[in-house]
């Protein structure tokens, strides 16, 4: 269990460094963060600039997770804009069946910008899930996420 | 960029080989649900909510609530004897309790709402020159267990306070105690504090027992009462200072 705590602490530290890097990258580019609220399947999220905090609700668990987005390009097509991106996610798993757990992964996806306020994104990525209770289960898989945002 | 994509592709192809079982999901929680279900099938994850450590009767540890590593040592606090009882439970509990009794028919109990698996619950104010028997009980939200009976032969020594307990009557309390001496004195001084210290009129009852008057302190849930009493002619051997939580009558 001590190793789990160390690993979780390491994830927190790395996530904090990632957040700082994203903030400084945003400022260096002169891109001010915009606040966006939205829904994902199955949960809700709040996004500021390239950083996101999301909550997802499953049948057996709830996840509190942070996401960092790295835009790749901005491709205008008539009234829309298609913005491919990649990113990382790390989250803590809450479940009455578990003593603890976390998930982390990397993803790539596409954001569709309908106008300056409404955006839709979908991404797919490789995720590592580690949960423990009586014993420990570590697994890897492919996860697709879908979100819709309203930016203020 | 091409090199990064190649590395990611190789990692992507390798991951199913190191994983227990590949999962595919729409939404992160769906993937985690799949991992939990696989863990339940393999016995690594509990099938009972609220019992992540097990206890679902499926034969996997820690299983049913148990008490272990019971340690008890008789100690002389100078003005009283006590047993330093410590023990472990195999899962986190909500309450622990100890019941102690003697061949003369006196019996006492105390409890503590707590959590965790490592516990200490001292038995205080034992009667000298007798044997005290005790059992330990532990509770979770759904289970309870009682230990075997243990016994401690308490030494024969003079000038000890013993059998300290409280009578409770509709928010009023009074303290009772005994003083193990050949010719007990007839006076004690006593004080109590719920929010501030007050004088507590104490007087001799019978035998070697003393008792205070009832104090109307509005004794209610969540309260703690501090008590302080001593015999002025032998204060160094009789000065008891202790605390008790609402719900208990013994210290």
Image (cartoon, coloured by chain):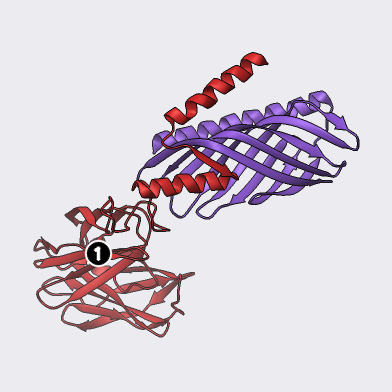
Front one among B128 and A124: A124
Residue B87, above or below B197? above
The answer to whether B30 appears left or right of B66 in the picture is right
Residue B92 seen in the current view:
yes
Q: Quadrant of the C terminus of chain B?
A: bottom left
Image spot of residue B3 (x, y percent): 62, 14
Residue B108 location, x and y as percent? 23, 73
Q: In the figure, the purple chain has which letter?
A: A
Q: Which residue is mark 1?
A: B145
Residue under the point 42% across and 58% down = B50
Residue B191 higher or lower than A122, as above or below? below
Residue at screen point 27% across, 58% down: B64
Q: Residue at x 73, y 42 (%)?
A: A47
Residue B89, position in %: x, y?
28, 54
Front-lying residue, B249 or B50: B50
Circle 1 crowding by C-alpha within 10 Å: few under 14, some 14–19, many from 20: some
Q: Say whether residue B173 is left or right of residue A18.
A: left
Question: Is B247 or A87 nearer to us in this picture?
Answer: A87
- Judging by colour alone, the chain drawn in red in this rendered image is B
Task: Indicate the secondary structure of the residue bearing disc 1.
Answer: strand
Residue in the foreground of this view, choosing between B228 and A33: A33
The residue sitting at 65% across, 51% down in the picture is A43
């Amino acid at each position: 269990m001590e190793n789990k705590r160390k690993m979780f602490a390491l994830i927190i530290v790395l996530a904090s460094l990632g957040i700082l890097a994203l903030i400084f990258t945003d400022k260096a580019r002169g891109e001010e963060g915009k606040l966006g609220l939205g829904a994902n399947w199955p949960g809700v999220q709040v996004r500021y600039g390239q950083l996101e905090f999301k909550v997802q609700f499953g049948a057996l668990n709830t996840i509190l997770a942070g996401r960092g987005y790295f835009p790749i390009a901005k491709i205008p097509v008539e009234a829309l804009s298609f913005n491919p991106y990649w990113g990382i996610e790390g989250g803590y798993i809450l479940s009455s069946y578990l003593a603890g757990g976390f998930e982390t992964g990397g993803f790539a996806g596409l954001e569709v910008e309908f106008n300056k306020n409404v955006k839709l994104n979908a991404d797919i990525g490789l995720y590592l899930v580690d949960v423990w209770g009586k014993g420990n289960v570590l697994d890897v898989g492919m996860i697709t996420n879908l979100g819709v945002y309203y930016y203020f | 960029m091409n090199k990064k994509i190649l590395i990611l592709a190789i990692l992507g192809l390798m991951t199913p080989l190191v994983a227990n079982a590949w999962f595919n999901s729409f939404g992160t929680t769906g993937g985690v649900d799949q991992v939990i279900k696989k863990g339940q099938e393999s016995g690594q994850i509990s099938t009972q909510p609220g019992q992540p450590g097990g206890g679902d009767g499926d034969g996997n540890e820690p299983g049913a609530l148990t008490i272990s590593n019971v340690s008890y040592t008789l100690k002389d606090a100078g003005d009283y004897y006590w047993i330093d009882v410590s023990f472990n439970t195999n899962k986190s509990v909500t309450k622990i309790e100890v019941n102690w009794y003697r061949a003369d028919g006196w019996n006492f109990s105390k409890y503590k709402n707590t959590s965790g698996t490592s516990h200490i619950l001292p038995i205080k104010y034992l009667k000298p020159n007798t044997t005290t028997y005790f059992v330990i009980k532990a509770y979770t939200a759904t289970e309870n267990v009682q230990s075997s009976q243990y016994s401690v032969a308490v030494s024969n020594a003079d000038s000890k306070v013993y059998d300290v307990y409280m009578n409770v009557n509709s928010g009023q309390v009074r303290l009772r105690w005994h003083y193990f001496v050949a010719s007990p004195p007839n006076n004690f001084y006593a004080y109590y504090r719920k929010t501030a210290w007050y004088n507590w009129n104490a007087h001799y009852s019978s035998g070697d027992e003393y008792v205070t008057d009832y104090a109307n302190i509005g004794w209610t849930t969540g309260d703690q009462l501090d008590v302080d009493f001593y015999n002025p002619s032998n204060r160094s051997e009789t000065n008891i200072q202790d605390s008790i939580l609402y719900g208990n009558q013994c210290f």
